[in-house]
Image (cartoon, rainbow, N blue to C red):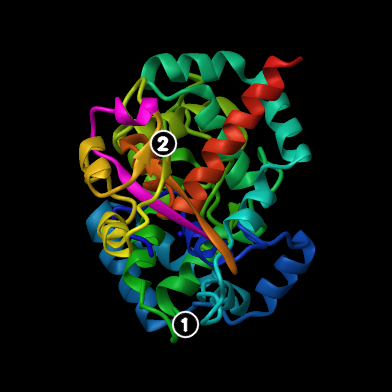
């Protein structure tokens, strides 16, 4: 989860998912809640921190929040060294491996949990699809990849994670402290609006929250009260999570009825292959332009009217895998800017749908 300021939900889970392309972990690691709380309590606080005090004054003025309340909340926030480590990129030279990444998500326990989630939330999934045009299986795929249907939502205090990355972003990677200061501000706005205790909210090491792992800014901009109870609750309301994921994808370009990708055989000629791979995951070329460059699509791909992207997924030392991604594939990457993530979401959702239909 690089993270543009317009902010994907996950994101920043997103930061780690980028690291996880090499294989093992895609979600924030499980951590015993008592251990995490003890570590946070032992860490330095932001009481009197000059940048934190300046932030409180500026955020109070911008957002109409009580400055003293912000100061008091930040005084209880802690710098967490584990957060600083987890946000770092993978070691240089780590090979990406789609097969290993895929196996992390498209596996029996997660598929079974997905079927149970779909059955328990069938009405919410159907109404979200009708309202936002995003198929239930795609929403189910997102929530399954993000948090294993709520089993892994993170044990870090969000205020600690965001304060750490806002005021003590680690050296060694591109500085995103401004982004996290913005998310910390959005977190306080969210807590004030929803009556939440900022000291009690838990999430990922980067501040993503709830079943769909939305960052606070994404909650404020795109989350919806899908169950109609007057509150947006992505932690306890599966309906709100479902509706919010569907709306997020709709806002970020999902087109109803469009396939996400098509099978493709890549050009043999290296120059033609490089040209098609140049825009990466951004749909750029027509089916006819694919053919002109020697890429072979199936019938559905040749009939596709919109632009396509040649998406390459590495498999370690083995040959890469390829798909021709549509605008809807690109829309899934707006949740997490990774072709590996997008294809895992799509394939998990499809596997859950097939397992559900077989019951």
Which residue is located at x 50 percent, y 75 percent?
89
Real-space CA distance between mark 2 and mark 1, rounded to the nearest whole angstrom: 37 Å
Q: Provide the secondary structure element on which disc 1 rests.
A: loop
Which of discs 2 and 1 lies nearer the camera? The answer is: 2
Which corner quadrant holds the C terminus? Answer: top right
Residue 319: x percent and y percent? 54, 61
Magenta range is 299-315
Does the magenta portion include 301?
A: yes
Residue 170 - label: 1
Q: Provide the secondary structure element on which disc 2 rests.
A: strand
Instruction: Choose top left, top right, bottom left or bottom right for residue 52.
Output: bottom left
Residue 267: x percent and y percent? 35, 52
Mark yes or no: residue 267 visible.
yes
Does the magenta portion include 68?
A: no
Residue 320 - label: none
Sort mark 1 into few (<14), some (14-19) or many (20+) by Cα contacts within 10 Å.
Answer: some
The correct choice, above or below, for 100 with respect to 243 in the image is: below
The correct choice, above or below, for 301 with respect to 48 in the image is: above
């Amino acid at each position: 989860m690089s993270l543009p300021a317009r902010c994907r939900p996950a994101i920043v889970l997103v930061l780690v998912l980028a690291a996880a392309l090499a294989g093992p972990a895609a979600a924030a690691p499980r951590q015993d809640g008592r251990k995490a709380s003890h570590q946070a309590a032992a860490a330095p606080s932001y009481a009197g921190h000059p940048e934190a005090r300046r932030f409180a004054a500026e955020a109070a003025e911008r957002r109409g929040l009580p400055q003293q309340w912000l100061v008091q909340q930040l005084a209880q926030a802690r710098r967490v060294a584990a957060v600083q480590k987890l946000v770092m990129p993978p070691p240089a030279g780590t090979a990406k491996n789609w097969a290993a990444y895929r196996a992390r998500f498209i596996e029996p326990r997660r598929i079974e949990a997905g079927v149970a989630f779909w059955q328990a939330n069938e009405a919410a999934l159907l109404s979200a699809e009708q309202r936002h045009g995003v198929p239930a299986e795609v929403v189910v795929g997102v929530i399954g990849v993000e948090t294993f249907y709520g089993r892994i939502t993170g044990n870090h205090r969000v205020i600690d994670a965001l304060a750490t990355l806002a005021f003590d972003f680690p050296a060694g990677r591109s500085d995103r402290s401004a982004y996290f200061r913005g998310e910390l501000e959005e977190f306080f706005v969210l807590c004030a609006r929803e009556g939440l205790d900022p000291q009690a909210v838990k999430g990922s090491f980067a501040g993503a929250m709830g079943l769909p792992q939305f960052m606070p800014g994404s909650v404020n901009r795109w989350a919806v009260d899908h169950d109609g109870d007057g509150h947006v609750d992505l932690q306890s309301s599966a309906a709100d999570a479902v509706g919010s994921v569907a709306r997020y994808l709709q806002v970020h370009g999902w087109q109803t009825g469009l396939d996400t990708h098509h099978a493709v055989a890549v050009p043999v000629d290296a120059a033609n292959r490089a040209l098609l791979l140049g825009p990466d995951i951004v749909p750029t070329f027509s089916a006819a332009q694919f053919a002109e460059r020697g890429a072979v699509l199936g019938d559905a791909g040749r009939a596709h009217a919109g632009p396509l992207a040649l998406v390459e997924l590495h498999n370690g030392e083995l040959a890469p895998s390829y798909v021709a991604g549509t605008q809807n594939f690109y829309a899934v990457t707006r949740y997490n800017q990774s072709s590996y993530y997008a294809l895992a979401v799509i394939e998990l959702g499809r596997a859950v749908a097939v397992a559900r239909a077989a019951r």
